[in-house]
Amino acid sequence: MFSEQLLDHFRNPRNAGELENATASVEVSNPVCGDVLRLAVETRQGTIAKVRFLCRGCTTSIACASKLTELVNGAPVEALAGMSVDTLASSFGGLPPESLHGAHLAADAARALYARIGGPSGSGP
């Protein structure tokens, strides 16, 4: 059902934990299943220097949050705005339809964080 890579991210999440002195952080949730994801970044000169997450949720939500941090760590801040459900799902070789909500949660957190940092609908630091 799940790829080995997804299971590895679930069992050994990357960049999990709090981020002191974060430039910005957001918390998003899925009211249907109850999953909650907190995502925080420290930025330097338009680049994501550090990223951390805390997630209370299912296997897919935790794995997608972990994968998200790998994809954006060291990337330009704009990478948050471009994060999509398809990008996250395909990074694991696809996800079963009933598990796509984990990728939605991570993509929503990325876009909300971009807005908070200073994207088109955010106020910026």
Image: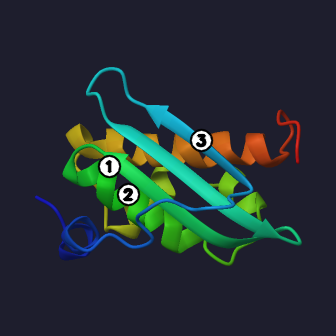
Q: Could you say whether the residue bearing mark 1 is in a helix, strand or loop? A: helix
Which residue is at 67% across, 46% downward?
113
Residue at the extreme left: 1
Determine which quarter of the picture holds residue 19.
Answer: bottom right
**The N terminus appears in which quarter of the rendering?**
bottom left
Q: Where is residue 107 in the image (x, y as percent from the top left)?
A: 52, 47
Q: Could you say whether the residue bearing mark 2 is in a helix, strand or loop? A: helix
Is residue 115 depicted above or below 70 in this figure?
A: above
The residues bearing labels 2 and 1 have C-alpha atoms spaced at a distance of: 5 Å
* Left or right of 74, for residue 99: left
Q: Would you name the residue on which mark 2 appears?
A: 64
Q: Where is residue 57 in the image (x, y as percent from the top left)?
A: 26, 43
Label 3 is placed on what type of residue?
Val
Q: Would you name the residue on which mark 1 appears?
A: 61
Which residue is at 51% across, 63% downward?
52
Label 2 is placed on what type of residue?
Cys
